[in-house]
């Protein structure tokens, strides 16, 4: 049964219950598009999310012959501080300089939580909040609620920069509480009853010492599973923000996280199944002398593959023959990794997905000895929630970005996202997957997914990031004892990012059936993207290539891009001061590495401040 039919049957059976869920205006994550018009924006509010009405753009991609449009090379001067900081007053420049300097002091960053707590106790809550709003909070957070963030959103939009809104309040858990929640939600009943008896790899099992997934994470929100009701509430939050984005523009974005939508046990188990099947394919490729080829180059001879499977005892001869009798599968006499992946299909019982090949015994074996009815139900509800969000995205004209997470969850997240793309990206790119380019396998993942979109004729959508879990991933791999999934150094990650980006840009150039979000603070990567766009005659108004940065960082990149007509977005967090402390703590940690690695942003800030003072602009205020 296909993914579409499977989920459809689930929705029909359970839609009545889903519709009874009460919508609560809670956390909001949505995108407000960058307007390129001088007309006055119309504000509106929807279920607690602030949106700004923008005039729709006529896209080159909507014209009859987009590829023949002549494009002049676009050159952007990232050294022009007058243009880069024209949206900032002098006090804002001074605040940025102060905050960035403090972020480079190791002691302050390492002890930031303790120091903030001490300051609050000494000065009192009211003075502490004022101090935070003058410094870290004012730099990285837009305001306390949807009303207080309106002025910042409007100002940024007037300078060509849109916003991804995120209510950045996080659950206040101790490390012990987080570890308990993780172990309860990631360990199956079978493992609890008979630990160590199932055929599980240690990478895809929960480990208490890494149960607090917030550790070593610098820029990503973390969700911990509590119960199904909480997952329903989080789904409704995503729905509210999808609606808000749809009301804001004709090309809005919303972002979701799979771990917010269900019990992570399923993501662990399904990830292990997918990885083991891929490993088995590479094992079979080695038997045909193709172990040194790239993932897409490994094309196996079908008859020899059948013989190898029979010799291994993986299924009866008739069963093996039936595996390759699909409409297209194996019709060319060969089979590649994409064909092989299609053997793993959705069935009416989720537990049937969790079958893995055992090379030693030559049998297909269940990953778990038992799979309870409640676990089955929980896994189905996760798929239902994902499907509901995708349908809301389509209905509201919003593109849905699925955030990347840890490598032990990611294979399942990517596969579920891929299935959504196959269903919902038939006419335009609606669903976007996120690729973490600090992973050694990033290029293989991108090329395989692009190739599948070509074969099946749907639109490919990607967000490219370097990655948010490096320190945690390295520590976990070393302590538990499996191969480090991360590239050896930052230079290797840069090369991987550019390699993946160029591949997707070439796909856009060839058939215009792909979109990419270049989510980076790296100026060289932005320049690389602009060069490739010029070479390929990709116009910014086609809305095929987007740029994204965090609020309070890299304004010298975001604002020149926005004013030049490129679709560019700031990630805009908001929430009460006390409740966004975890977010501010991560910003301090991220900026430590960023500011130590480059003094460029501080130099540009000083340059602009001196220019204004020398020019008599002591009381400069932005005009918009």
Image (cartoon, rainbow, N blue to C red):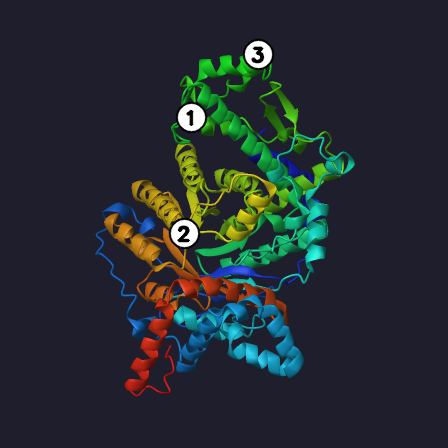
Query: CB of mark 1 within 8 Å of CB of mark 2?
Result: no
Circle 3 crowding by C-alpha within 10 Å: few under 14, some 14–19, many from 20: few
The residues bearing labels 1 and 3 have C-alpha atoms spaced at a distance of 28 Å
Residue situated in front as seen by the camera: 171 or 342: 171
Give the structural element (helix, strand or loop) at label 1: loop
Give the camera-side residue of 395 and 259: 259
Q: Which residue reaches farthest right?
A: 193
Would you name the residue on which mark 3 appears? 318
Which corner quadrant holds the C terminus? bottom left
Which of 260 and 60 lies nearest the eye of the viewer? 260
Dot 1, how many residues are within 10 Å of its Cα: few (below 14), some (14-19), or many (20+)?
Answer: some
In the drawing, what numbered circle is on residue 291?
1
- In the rendered view, tell whether residue 258 sits above or below residue 301: below
Residue on which disc 2 sits: 490
**Label 1 vs 3, first from the N-terminus:** 1
Secondary structure beneath disc 3? helix
Tell whether 299 sits left or right of 564: right
């Amino acid at each position: 049964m296909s993914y579409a039919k499977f989920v459809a049957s689930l929705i029909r059976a359970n839609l009545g219950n889903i519709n009874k869920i009460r919508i609560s205006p809670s956390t909001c994550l949505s995108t407000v598009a960058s307007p390129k018009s001088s007309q006055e924006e119309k504000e509106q509010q929807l279920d607690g999310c602030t949106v700004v009405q923008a005039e729709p753009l006529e896209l080159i991609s909507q014209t009859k012959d987009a590829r023949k449009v002549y494009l002049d090379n676009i050159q952007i001067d990232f050294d022009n501080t007058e243009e880069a900081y024209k949206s900032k007053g002098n006090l804002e420049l001074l605040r940025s300089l102060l905050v960035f300097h403090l972020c480079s002091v190791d002691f302050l960053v390492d002890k930031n939580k303790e120091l903030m707590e001490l300051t609050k106790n000494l000065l009192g809550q009211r003075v502490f909040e004022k101090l935070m709003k003058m410094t870290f909070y004012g730099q990285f957070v837009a305001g306390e609620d949807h009303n207080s963030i309106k002025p910042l959103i409007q100002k940024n939009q007037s300078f060509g920069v849109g916003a991804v809104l995120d209510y950045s309040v996080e659950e206040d858990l101790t490390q012990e509480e987080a570890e308990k929640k993780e172990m309860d939600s990631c360990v199956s009943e079978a493992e609890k009853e008979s630990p160590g008896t199932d055929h599980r790899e240690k990478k895809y099992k929960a480990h208490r010492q890494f149960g607090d997934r917030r550790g070593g994470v610098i820029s990503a929100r973390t969700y911990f599973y509590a119960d199904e009701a909480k997952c329903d509430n989080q789904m409704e939050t995503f729905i509210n923000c999808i609606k808000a984005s749809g009301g804001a523009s004709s090309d809005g974005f919303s972002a979701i996280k799979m771990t917010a939508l269900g019990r992570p046990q399923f993501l662990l188990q399904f990830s292990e199944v997918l990885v083991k099947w891929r490993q088995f394919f590479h094992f079979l490729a080695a038997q045909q002398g193709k172990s040194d080829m790239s993932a897409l180059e490994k094309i196996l001879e079908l008859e020899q593959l059948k013989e190898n499977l029979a010799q291994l005892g993986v299924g009866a001869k008739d069963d093996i023959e039936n595996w390759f009798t699909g409409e297209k599968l194996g019709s060319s006499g060969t089979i590649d990794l994409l064909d092989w992946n299609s053997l793993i299909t959705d069935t009416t019982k989720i537990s049937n997905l969790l079958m893995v090949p055992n090379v030693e015994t030559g049998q297909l074996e269940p990953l778990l000895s038992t799979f309870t009815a409640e676990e089955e139900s929980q896994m189905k509800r996760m798929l239902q929630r994902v499907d509901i969000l995708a349908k809301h995205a389509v209905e509201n004209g919003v593109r849905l970005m699925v955030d990347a997470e840890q490598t032990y969850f990611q294979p399942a997240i990517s596969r579920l996202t891929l299935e959504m793309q196959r269903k919902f990206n038939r006419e335009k790119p609606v669903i976007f997957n996120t690729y973490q380019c600090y992973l050694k396998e990033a290029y293989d993942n991108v090329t395989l997914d692009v190739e599948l979109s070509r074969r099946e004729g749907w639109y490919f959508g990607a967000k490219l990031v370097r990655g948010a879990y490096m320190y945690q991933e390295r520590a976990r791999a070393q302590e538990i004892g499996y191969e480090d999934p991360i590239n050896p150094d930052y230079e290797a990650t840069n090369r991987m990012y550019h390699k993946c980006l160029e591949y997707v840009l070439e796909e856009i150039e060839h058939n215009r059936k792909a979109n990419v979000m270049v989510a980076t603070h790296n100026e060289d990567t932005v320049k690389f993207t602009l060069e490739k766009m010029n070479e390929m005659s990709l116009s910014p108004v086609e809305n095929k290539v987007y740029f994204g940065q965090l609020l309070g960082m890299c304004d010298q990149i975001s604002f020149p891009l926005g004013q030049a007509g490129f679709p560019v977005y700031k990630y805009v967090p908001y929430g009460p001061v006390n409740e966004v402390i975890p977010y501010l703590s991560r910003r301090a940690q991220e900026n430590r590495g960023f500011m130590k690695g480059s003094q460029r942003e501080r130099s540009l800030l000083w340059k602009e401040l001196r220019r204004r003072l020398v020019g008599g602009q002591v009381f400069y205020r932005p005009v918009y």
